[in-house]
Amino acid sequence: MQLAAKSDILIVDDIPDNLRVLSAMLSQHGYEVRKVLNGRLALAAANSTPPDLILLDIRMEGMDGYEVCQRLKASAQTCEIPIIFLSALHDVFDKVKAFEVGGVDYITKPFHVEEVLARVKNQLTIRTLQKQLQDYNTVLESRVEERTAQLQTMLEYEALLKGITDRVRDSFDEAQILQAVVQELGTGLRILCCDVGIFDYEANTETIRYEYCCAEIASAQGEVVSLDRLPGLYQQILQSNPTQFCVLPFAQLVTRNVAGRFAILICPLLDDQGVFGALWLFKPREEEFSVLEIRLVQQVANQCAIALRQARLYQAVQEQVEELERMHLLKDDFLSTVSHELRSPISNIKLATQMLEVILKSTGILEDTSSKAANYFRILQDECHREIHLINDLLDLTRLDAGVEPLTLIKIDLAPWISHLAEPFLARTHSQHQHFQVDIPSHIPALATDLHYLERILTELLTNACKYTPTGESITLSAQVIPEQANQNPLQVIQHSEGDRSSLTPMTLQICVTNTGIEISENERDRVFDKFYRIPNNDPWKHGGTGLGLALAKKMSEHLGAKLSVSSGNQQTSFVLELPI
């Protein structure tokens, strides 16, 4: 440790010889020495120019060394000066008292050169280290205070950022978002002014749309600035770089009626298309924007961009919703119009046919079933009936596609309900010499479904089976409850007792219509549910149809949340309806 060059030492002793000896000894070793003969002069010398070390004699006339030491230690200016007491006394009490009043060491007379120099050097070294430690502590305290203030500022800015983020994310209005940004930044950073300028690339201008201003700053909202006025500055903004500059005349930017110069921070605002505007922040010219402030403004700009994207997405979704609602209303109106325009003529035709039948019967023309008139009338009735079915099927399909048909769920006991549904087909299959069997277990659980749709689906499947099953072949209507994981094979049958059913969850009800004597090829199977598609040369009874029955059944099953599928092979075909229980 190097001592300070020419340390200043004050020697206090009322014996001149002692002063000379000590002064000569210390001067020879490079110390600057001052000498005084009493305590009063010692206090004056120490207060006028505080020394680095004091050698103080204890026994002096007037004011002794103890009192001098006490007074020096009581003064803020001299309390840190190390004091070495000088005395010829060897009494332990005196040494203790010397340390009690503030002395740091004790040298007894007569003096030994090596001892004096060693003790002086030791105390000066200690004093130098103490000063360095004090300096380090001062610097450290300053850094701690600075860092504490910085952390406090960071916490404040974090809270400000969160507040701005929450506010802009809660809004889906672009104007509210940008106005909230300038308001919160202006008040949160306590600046003179905060603007948002929106760029118009076609006109090559920037318009001040949103602003916050303190009382002494005039408004510039609505002002238009040419991007050519400061091309270098705007070039940086368009490159998405935040820019800070000072002492720029305000009039160069916008036409506020304010004299003076400002420190200005500009941060670009971006959307999906690039830079659409800029944040302008103004401070007095003697201030500047800190790194934390610049970072905060950038984060706010990023959050602003996110909020604007959300707002625009929300606006787009709202427009789509409104468009869908409009289309929904148009569909309802279309269905109502089509229903009226299609059904009115056919109703009139049907009514006219009925009236014609009455007239023809009254004249006896229809009594001869082989006559041309009777044949033509039969064709008229059949085609009228077919047209009515076609119109009804088309309208039903359109309603299902439009999603305007609500479900009316009713809980039913399936076994008796299906048996009742199948009764009309017993006579039909009997007349066509087909075998019809209904196989519904009595323990099938109750089913909550829309009976209108379920009845139409099963009626279509049974009608289809009657239409395509040859003479002598069989038609079977069956139902079973199976675990959902067993649905991979629609023809798989798993039997469970009444007590077992409650433990099988989830469960699926399979209703199967199977007919024999006919097979659908694989390439035809993929098309049986298409609208207006009919399997060629496969109608032995020549019943005809609209070609919409299976397509309508498929659509109705989907509306019920069910699944309708077909499988065929080994001269039999099965249509399986799967409904969740």
Image: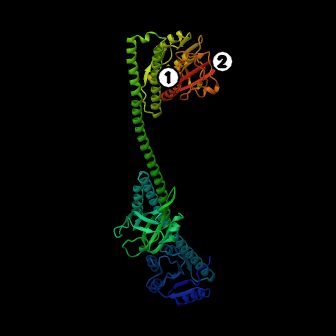
Q: Closest to the observer: 487 or 198?
A: 198
Name the residue tied to disc 1: 457
Q: Which x, y percent locates residue 274?
A: 52, 59
Q: Nearer the viewer, residue 465 or 93?
A: 465
535 lies left or right of 188: right
Q: Is residue 449 visible?
A: no
- The answer to whether the residues at label 1 and label 2 have Cβ atoms under 8 Å apart is no
Q: How many C-alpha atoms fall within 10 Å of the one at disc 1: few (<14), some, or many (≥20)?
A: many
**Would residue 531 be found to the left or right of residue 172 on screen?**
right
Residue 119 image-quadrant placement? bottom right
Extreme right residue here? 570
Q: Which residue is mark 2?
A: 570
Amino acid type of the residue tagged 1 in the rendering: Ile
**The N terminus appears in which quarter of the rendering?**
bottom right
Vertical comparison of 138 with 384: above or below: below
In the displayed orientation, state which residue is furthest to the left: 215
The quarter of the displayed image where residue 524 is located: top right
Q: Can you say whether 405 is above or below 223 in the image?
A: above
**Residue at 62%, 83% in the rendered image:** 113
Residue pictured at 48% horizontal, 56% vertical: 305
